[in-house]
Amino acid sequence: MGRKARDPEQTGKEPTPPWKPDEPCPCGSDHLYAQCFLGIDGRAYKSPIGRRPPGPQTGFSHARCYMGWSHDCDQQISGEHFISASVLTQLGGPKVKLNGVPWLAADETKILPISSLTGNILCKRHNEAFSQLDAMAGKFFAALKLNHDDIFDRKTLSRRWKWLLFSGEELELWFLKAAIGLFHSGNVAKDKTKLSDTQTINPQCYDILYGGILPAPCGLYVEPIHISEQINQFQLQPLSDDAGQRMVGLRMTYMSFALTLLFDPAATYGPSATVSKTYRPSYLMVRNAKRTHTVMLTWTPTTSTMRGVVRASFWKSTDCVTARFSEAGACSGGGSEEVISGRVWSMSCHLP
Ligand SMILES: [Zn+2]
Ligand SMILES: [Zn+2]
Ligand SMILES: [Zn+2]
């Protein structure tokens, strides 16, 4: 890593991923790149991992498991948090900030101790079937943190670029699992009324979690945000439909990115849900004057040469009162077939 890899805004070209086939895969698995993400066309892509329990169907439905409809539960209920330990340990702080739930005013925020993100909503068998998604998400949030920590480190003069690689589709599925978990979790409630007693989630979402991919325009939207005083704070915000009857999305903020998953295929999402956000970005970049670190997300290959880029820049003396967002154009140009066009949302901020 740390080989030549240029910013697509300057080059107008899709950066060449810096990994060699015989190197360990940058996704953090035990496999070589060639056996994991590297496709035969030379591009990085892998299909999302399976989420069904192994072996023959048990025929049993646990009354408290939200995947009980699949008749493939075991008898034991899992106590694991719906945002798994692998992710929570990366997020660091003992608290999660929650807002946008129906019983709080628009600007009201609730701080929840992580211990309240209770389990008891999946049987052990289904919980284990999702464990690879959880492990991936732990690595994803660790990568975001690693990239930011290095960019904020004023002592390091290194110009080395960090590049990490994840499946965008797996990230969406983990996010969907977190949203469904939040929805079913009893402690996220007002007057002991669960969110799931006042709203529903489209049943199609459970099928997708089990064995599908979210259809467009559902999926992941990312925007850069100004870093807050509490850098490590993790914030969750469920999104409801206009009638307040369905939970149709979840917004999650961490470090300088806000990730929004819109997951109800039957919902109509207005422009406010998607404007100023990049849909299914290929690159999440964090940079300072010396170096740029990239988390690359892969998506089902298409013939489109549009690549979404979300970039947070940190300079010593930037007045960060005004966020500068620019929609580019900036990635297009040139004549080679490598050239990509893209939508870049960038933000400049002070170094914390
Ligand atoms: Zn890999
Ligand atoms: Zn189950
Ligand atoms: Zn700022």
Image (cartoon, rainbow, N blue to C red):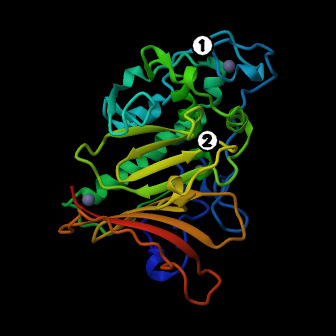
Q: Nearer the viewer, residue 352 or 262?
A: 262
Residue 337 x %, y %? 65, 83
Name the residue carrying label 2.
173
The tag earlier along the polypeptide, 2 or 1, is: 1
Q: Nearer the viewer, residue 235 or 335?
A: 235
In the displayed structure, 112 sits above or below 270; it is above
Lateral position of residue 5 relative to residue 210, left or right: left
Whether residue 151 is visible, yes or no, is: yes
Residue type for callout 1: Ile
In the displayed structure, 95 sits above or below 1; it is above
How many residues crowd around disc 2 within 10 Å: few (fewer than 14), some, or many (20 or more)? many
Report helix, strand or loop for mark 1.
strand
Q: Nearer the viewer, residue 34 or 45?
A: 45
Residue 118, labelled with which disc?
A: none
Whether residue 30 is visible, yes or no, is: no
Lateral position of residue 239 relative to residue 285, left or right: right
In the displayed structure, 151 sits above or below 136; it is below
Quarter of the image for residue 128 reads top right
Residue visible at 41% across and 32% down? Answer: 88
Report helix, strand or loop for mark 2.
helix
